[in-house]
Image (cartoon, rainbow, N blue to C red):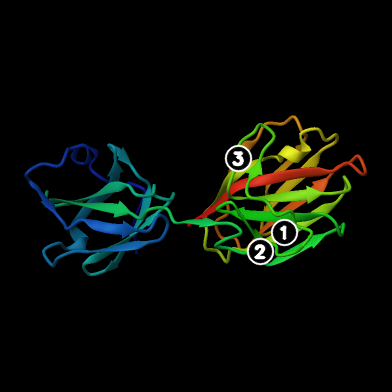
Amino acid sequence: MIFMLIICFFNTRAFAQPIGSNWTNFNEKYNVSLSKSWKVNFSKEISLDKIDGAVIEKDNKFIPVNINISGNNSITITPINNYEPNTRYCLKLFLNNNKKYYMYFNTIKEEIYYLGKDISYMNFKKSNFLSNFNTLYDNKTIEPNVSLSPIKENLKDNIGNLYGHGIAFYDTDGVSSMHLEYPLLNKYRRFKGTIGIETSSRSSNGSISVKIYADDEKVYDKSWKSEAFPENIDLDIQNTQKLIIEVKGNGPALQKHSIGIYNPILIK
């Protein structure tokens, strides 16, 4: 039985009241998931059929959630939008006998995983034998283990920023295409990083394109020229089985291009 969606049929005057001495406190809860449902168990003194309303607050603002009565003395709370990581929220519960309860809960910290280190690629295809990619972590080349991949200690973009972690793509003939896949298995929420021309292509003519897919959905698409500034990306990859990165040189022929995805991280 769904008890309420977001915040509905409640006494707004009561909800606006700050926590005072007439409120009863439940034990604080820790490590609440940012996106998954979680359960609150109450003592027998609280009869759920007497609940007049419930709300979750942060900084005096209501947080939208679904609340479901999941047993005689428990409710299940599901966030509509993900909670913020490492953040403290307050659950307030109002009964129709004028009793009021509250409980603070704290969300987990973000779990960060490094693309290329924590999640290795599962497939790589290219149209030209000499074109390739190169992954660095902690200033060391970690993949792929092939002689054609340049061995570097760092990556540098076209405005001089150095990166100890990143993935660089090298188009050796100006029109090569590369296709790189990573298994995500529905485990991650966001894909973050910085995309920019690699320093060796600062004088290149033409352009190179980067497309990123969350399964079949294109979540990023841009054509890059040597004079373009690097840009940060923050992509929604929830419910994604496979992350796909496609890089293609747009000519002219025989013109080398290189571009990097710097500090690429996945967030649970």
Q: Which residue is mark 2?
A: 121
Decide which of 7, 97 is in the foreground and name it. Answer: 7
The image shows residue 159, relative to residue 129, as above or below, that is above
The reply to whether residue 235 is visible in this rendering is no
The label shown at residue 123 is: none
**Residue carrying label 3:** 162
Kind of residue indicated by mark 2 = Tyr
Q: Secondary structure at mark 3?
A: strand
Judged from this view, the residue extending furthest toward the left is 21
Mark 3 in CB contact with mark 2 (< 8 angstroms): no
Which label lies toward us, 1 or 3? 3
Q: Compared to 49, does 192 lie above or below?
A: above
Q: Amino acid at mark 1?
A: Leu
Q: Mark 2 or mark 1: which comes first in sequence?
A: 2
Visible residue check, residue 209: yes
Mark-to-mark CA distance, 1 and 3 = 23 Å
Residue placed under numbered mark 1 in the picture: 180
Q: Residues within 10 Å of mark 2 (few under 14, many from 20)?
A: some
- In this view, the residue in front, 199 or 191, is 199
- Please give the name of the residue rendered at 74% of the width and 53% of the height, measured from the top-left corner: 150
Among the 4 quarters of the image, the one containing residue 34: bottom left
Q: Secondary structure at mark 1?
A: strand
Residue 137 is drawn in which quadrant?
bottom right
Left or right: 123 with respect to 102? right
Front residue of 179/95: it is: 179
Say few, some or many: other residues with alpha carbon within 10 Å of mark 3 (under 14 / 14 to 19 / 20 or more): few
